[in-house]
Image (cartoon, rainbow, N blue to C red):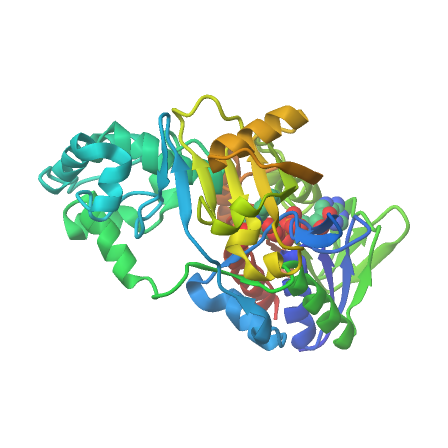
Amino acid sequence: MSGTAVVVGGGVGGLVAARRLALHGRQVVLLERSATVGGRVARGTIAGVTADTGAESFAVRGGTVRALIDDLGLRGALAEPRGSAWVALADRTVPLPAGGVLGIPGSPLAEDVRRVIDGHGAARAYADRLLPVLKVGRYERLGPLVRGRMGRRVLDRLVAPVVESVYGVDAETVPVDAIAPQLNAAITVAGSLSAAVLRLRSAAPAGSAVQGLRGGVTRLVDALLADLERLGVDVRLDAEVIGVHPAPVGPGFTVVTPREDVVADVAVIAVDGAAALDLLRDAAPDVAHLPRPEPSVSRSVLLAVDDPRLDAMPRGSGVLRASGRTDVTAVALTHVTAKWAWSADALPAGRHLLRLAYRAADLPAETRVAADAAALLGLVPTTIVDRLDTVWVDTAPPLAPETRAAHQALSAAPLPQGLAVTGSWRSGTGLASVVAGAETAARGLG
Ligand SMILES: Cc1cc2nc3c(=O)[nH]c(=O)nc-3n(C[C@H](O)[C@H](O)[C@H](O)COP(=O)(O)OP(=O)(O)OC[C@H]3O[C@@H](n4cnc5c(N)ncnc54)[C@H](O)[C@@H]3O)c2cc1C
């Protein structure tokens, strides 16, 4: 295949799509609005070392990211996470049980589950095994499904902390089929929710669910960029695309930036949701004019602290906050130097990196952040050496109802030939989904 291609957006989705199109023999131009590529895979400097400020790992499911890492020669940099997560309940902080799906336990009577939901909660959760399952229809919302079958403690103490910190959505209202597409079918076959969880877990590969890269996940972006250079892709930075116009007659597109127009046979829109909908106004006006979702705004605060007591990894890889825990504002804390050995190795003895996640852009005061860290870790870190804040805006969270309506509209109304739309708002949050979606989108264009 030869011909020209333009890719709009230089996040991982756009970089992967550009690489695939170039490997297919196309001459590719990639246009990125900001001064760097990578999007939500980004780095910053704190206490003199480099740290991931956005994504810090990737899911191994599907093997797509791993295949890309192998292709890019990064296999030697793969890193396994250490420790596992804890959950901060209203009255205590305990390890999260192993082996669930979205926090839903497969074995409700297991010791590690009882430690979180107590004997009474475990007995209620076990009732799931005895309740009949829907034979007609599907469970619609996650909250009523979990609460109805396993009780409130499982929902509040196990499922909500995982769903809200990992996906940033309300566990009560999120559609089951959106967040766990295989769960309804597994319940029907297995006969209960917990048996469905065991079934899904047994189908998952052994080993960690996520991996990272020594030096940070941004190494994937560096390697992709180097490969694009090798393949002759023309990467243009500070190039915000303001229009994508299908040719009035025949194939091809004109992609407009304030400085120049780029004409190509095929185009990939790989920007975040609201920007993508804006750019679809010519190619798919019915989709572009749909109501927009509420953007999801979050802030991550990296702290460098000096405290040798943290060497013992008192809270494993980090802590998720359960809804009943009202004295803490942060939704989660990652103990970065506990989770990633390479990160600890880069720092002087006794120094640690912590990452706190907040669900709003508001600047939390130094005292608030310190109090949250102390409450979640169960100790007051002696000295805060440095702090690095990053605000993230997701303009079309993939699980929002309006985003899902846009997906349906895009599937129903075929785009002009030669145009593809990809990125996390389309394929789902996380690098595993984004890389797989971008590969599929680019392969579809040839
Ligand atoms: C704090 C945080 C932590 C995360 N942690 C993880 C994790 O540990 N593991 C994981 O798998 N995922 C994680 N994610 C999610 C993951 O980072 C994203 O799903 C993924 O990086 C999205 O890639 P993308 O290419 O779809 O979009 P983006 O990374 O948003 O890239 C879109 C690009 O398009 C550019 N752009 C926008 N508009 C225009 C325009 N008009 N013209 C030109 N360019 C434009 C933007 O500047 C940007 O570079 C995390 C995300 C955040 C915010």
> Is residue 388 left or right of 155 when viewed as pictured?
right
The residue at the point 44 percent across, 48 percent down is: 316
Residue 313: x %, y % from top left: 47, 49
Q: Total label count?
A: 0
The residue at the point 51 percent across, 54 percent down is: 339
* Quadrant assignment, res 228: bottom right
Judge whether 245 appears above or below 367 on screen: below
Judge whether 188 appears above or below 301 on screen: below
Residue 114: x %, y % from top left: 22, 39
Judge whether 367 appears above or below 8 on screen: above
Who is closer to the viewer here, 270 or 435? 435
Quadrant of image for the N terminus: bottom right
Q: Is residue 27 visible?
A: no
The residue at the point 78 percent across, 72 percent down is: 229
Quadrant of image for the C terminus: bottom right
Residue sticking out furthest to the left: 130
Residue 43: x %, y % from top left: 70, 52
